Amino acid sequence: MAATLYFIALLLRLYWFILLARVIIEMVRSFSRQWRPSRRFALVAEPIFVLTDFVIRPLRRVIPPLRLGGVALDVSVLVLFFGISILISILTTVAASAL
């Protein structure tokens, strides 16, 4: 049981890093409007967006962006980061106590 929980926590950590890569790509895209990715970069970025879209899109429907003047901050990604981090912490704690 503990090994299974550790494995799930490992998968969640991997997903957390994939989500971080998506945030970095979106930040580069938003700050540099004239930037166009190369084909190689697009081949790497496409799976990142495919893997994260199915979780982020429903969250964006539920959690509205935070308006700060003329800027809208997407809080749903932050909520997902915190949720995954809390879930990883719970899984590793339960797995450690199961040993």
Image (cartoon, helix red, strand yellow):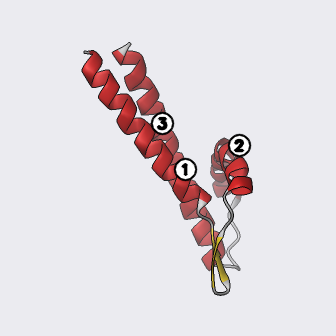
- Residue 80 location in percent, x, y? 55, 50
Instruction: Assess disc 1: are there few (<14), some (14-19) or many (≥20) residues with their C-alpha within 10 Å of its C-alpha.
Output: some
The residue indicated by pointer 2 is 54
User: From what the image shows, is residue 71 above or below residue 19?
Assistant: below
The mark tally for this picture is 3
Q: Give the Cα separation between the discs numbered 3 and 2.
A: 15 Å
Dot 3 or dot 2, earlier in sequence: 3
Give the crowd class for mark 2: few <14, some 14-19, many >=20 residues within 10 Å.
few
Viewer-nearest of labels 3 and 1?
Answer: 1
Q: Which mark is residue 80?
A: 1
Residue type at mark 1 is: Leu
Q: Mark 3 highlights which residue?
A: 12
Q: Quadrant of residue 4?
A: top left
Name the residue rendered at 58%, 57% in the picture. Answer: 77
Do residues under tags 3 and 1 come within 8 Å of each other at their CB atoms?
no
Disc 3, disc 2: CB below 8 Å? no
Query: Is the residue 45 above or below the residue 34 in the image?
Result: above
Q: Secondary structure at mark 3?
A: helix
Residue 89 is left or right of residue 11, and the answer is left
User: Which is more foreground, mark 1 or mark 2?
Assistant: 1
Could you tell me which secondary element the residue under label 2 belongs to? helix
Tell which residue pokes out farthest to the bottom in this image. Answer: 69
Quarter where residue 54 is shown: top right
